[in-house]
Image: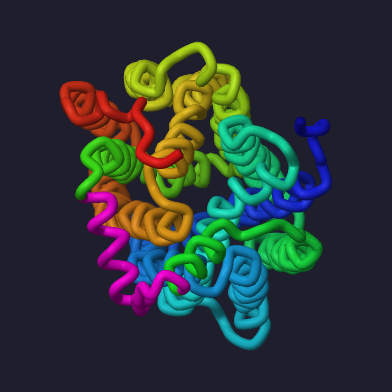
């Protein structure tokens, strides 16, 4: 009989997860703000954000291979150390020369190379930490995504305050320190590695171990052959590509001319606060509602609560709408984690997460750049309303996909 929950492994993983969310929150608000400050161009901000996402397309599948091949902890540690170097590069370069669009694109792309590995490794660690802590994986999925969103509440607020007090360049020293602490904490996380155990078992059985490219191809095959998983991943990828310009380009473009970085931080923080509650509540919700019905509710509620934001109402209403939108979307990520854990073998989960992350990187860049160009020509509100329309059409289309109905079944024990 299992004893009570052991909180030390959870605390180590989730503190690292929190600091990662905070770091990303600071960078997300600081990069476009810095570009707008340097160029005074919405299109340039969209271009930098879009191009900086491209390295993740190749880095994410390799990250998935690295997690399955080398182990979840070591990849998490190395990724955080390299991420610390990448964010410190912005203030270091700014000290020696004047930042321009070319420098900002290059430095933002550098940071995007290392982020997928840490994100994938931490997600792959969830079952190992759940086992060592005597907590259900479903519950820890919700806690993990909720804690990551806590970081996105604190990160934008901290980023906006740092921009207002120290400037957008100096703001990057905060994620530098947080990434270093994150790497240090995982050094002390002593748990098993189900992926390495499954890999060793296959090797003992005489199965050959594929190389990085073969692993990436296998990850694609796993997703493609699992119709329910494929439908869920593609749905979230497409919806994310449509929505992402809202946070990364359009809302900064709305608030920057007003000189209100704190207002932008409040809206982004409200989105994240809602996501925290929705994600943490997934463990409770999953005991009472099927995965299919959770997915349906998320899709419907998301399109309902996005429209008020697209109308750019007064700040209190925008903050409330952002909170509701985050609350609606919150259960989706832990739901996806659960589906992968229940339908994919442990030594293949890293590569599946890697392909999933790669898809998320490949889809948004064109949308972000296009949103910046259109907003510069027609204004922010018309583009937001156009995005609202696309979200409605996409969500309604996803609800009609028959293969999604299979997400309640498990393929592994």
**Residue 212 belongs to magenta span:** yes
Residue 220 magenta: yes
Tell me if residue 384 comes above or below residue 96 in the rendering: above
Q: Position of residue 342 (x, y in %)?
A: 43, 39
* Residue situated furthest front in the rendering: 205
Q: Is residue 77 above or below residue 251?
A: below
Residue at image coords 74%, 42%: 133
- Residue at (81% x, 63% y) in the render: 188
* Figure coloring: rainbow
Q: Nearer the viewer, residue 125 or 43?
A: 125
Residue 109 in sight from this viewpoint: no
- Residue 309, by quadrant, is top left
The mark tally for this picture is: 0
How far across and down, in percent of the image, does residue 211 sit?
Answer: 35, 79
Camera-nearest residue between 378 and 161: 161
Q: Residue furthest top?
A: 288
The main secondary structure of the magenta stretch is helix
Q: Which quadrant, please, contains the N terminus?
A: top right
Q: Residue at x 71, y 57 (%)?
A: 191
User: Where is residue 245 shown, x and y percent of the image?
Assistant: 37, 45
Left or right placement of residue 188 versus residue 394 in this view: right
- Residue 389 lies in quadrant: top left
| Residue 3 visible at all | yes
Q: Which residues are magenta?
A: 204-224
Q: Which residue corresponds to the image point at 21% horizontal and 28% vertical from the top-left?
A: 398
Side (left or right) of 367 relative to 36? left
Q: Quadrant of the C terminus?
A: top left
Instruction: Say above or below: 233 vs 27.
Output: above
Left-right relation of 255 to 81:
left
Extreme-bottom residue of the structure:
96
Q: Position of residue 67 (x, y in %)?
A: 51, 66
């Amino acid at each position: 009989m299992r004893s009570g929950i052991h909180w030390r492994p959870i605390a180590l993983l989730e503190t690292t997860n929190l600091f990662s969310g905070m770091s990303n929150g600071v960078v997300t608000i600081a990069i476009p703000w810095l570009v707008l400050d340097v160029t005074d161009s919405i299109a340039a901000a969209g271009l930098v954000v879009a191009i900086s996402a491209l390295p993740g397309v190749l880095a994410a599948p390799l990250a998935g291979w690295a997690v399955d091949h080398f182990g979840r902890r070591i990849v998490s540690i190395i990724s955080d150390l390299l991420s610390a170097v990448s964010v410190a590069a912005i203030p270091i370069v700014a000290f020696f020369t004047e930042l321009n669009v070319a420098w900002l694109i290059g430095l933002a792309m550098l940071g995007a190379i290392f982020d997928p590995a840490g994100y994938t490794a931490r997600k792959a660690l969830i079952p190992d930490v759940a086992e060592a802590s005597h907590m259900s994986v479903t519950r820890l999925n919700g806690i993990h995504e909720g804690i990551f969103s806590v970081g996105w509440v604190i990160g934008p607020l901290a980023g906006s305050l740092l921009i207002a007090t120290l400037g957008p360049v100096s703001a990057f020293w905060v994620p530098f320190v947080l990434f270093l602490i994150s790497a240090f904490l995982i050094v002390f996380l002593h748990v098993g590695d189900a992926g390495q155990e499954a890999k060793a078992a296959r090797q003992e059985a005489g199965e050959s171990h594929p190389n990085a490219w073969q692993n990436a191809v296998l990850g694609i095959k796993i997703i493609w052959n699992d119709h329910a998983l494929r439908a869920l991943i593609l749905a979230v990828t497409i919806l994310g590509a449509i929505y992402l310009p809202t946070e990364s380009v359009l809302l900064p473009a709305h608030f920057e001319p007003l000189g209100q970085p704190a207002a932008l931080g409040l809206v982004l923080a409200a989105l994240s606060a809602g996501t925290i509650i929705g994600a943490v509540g997934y463990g409770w919700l999953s005991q009472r509602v099927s995965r299919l019905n959770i997915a349906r509710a998320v899709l419907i509620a998301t399109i309902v609560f996005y429209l008020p934001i697209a109308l750019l109402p007064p700040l209190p209403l925008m903050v409330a709408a952002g909170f509701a939108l985050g609350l609606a979307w919150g259960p989706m990520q832990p739901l996806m984690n659960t589906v992968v854990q229940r339908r994919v073998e442990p030594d293949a989960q890293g590569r599946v997460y890697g392909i999933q992350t790669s898809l998320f990187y490949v889809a948004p860049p064109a949308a972000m750049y296009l949103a910046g160009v259109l907003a510069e020509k027609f204004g922010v509100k018309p583009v937001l309303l156009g995005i609202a329309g696309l979200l409605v059409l996409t969500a309604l289309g996803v609800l009609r996909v028959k293969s999604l109905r299979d997400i309640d079944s498990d393929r592994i024990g």
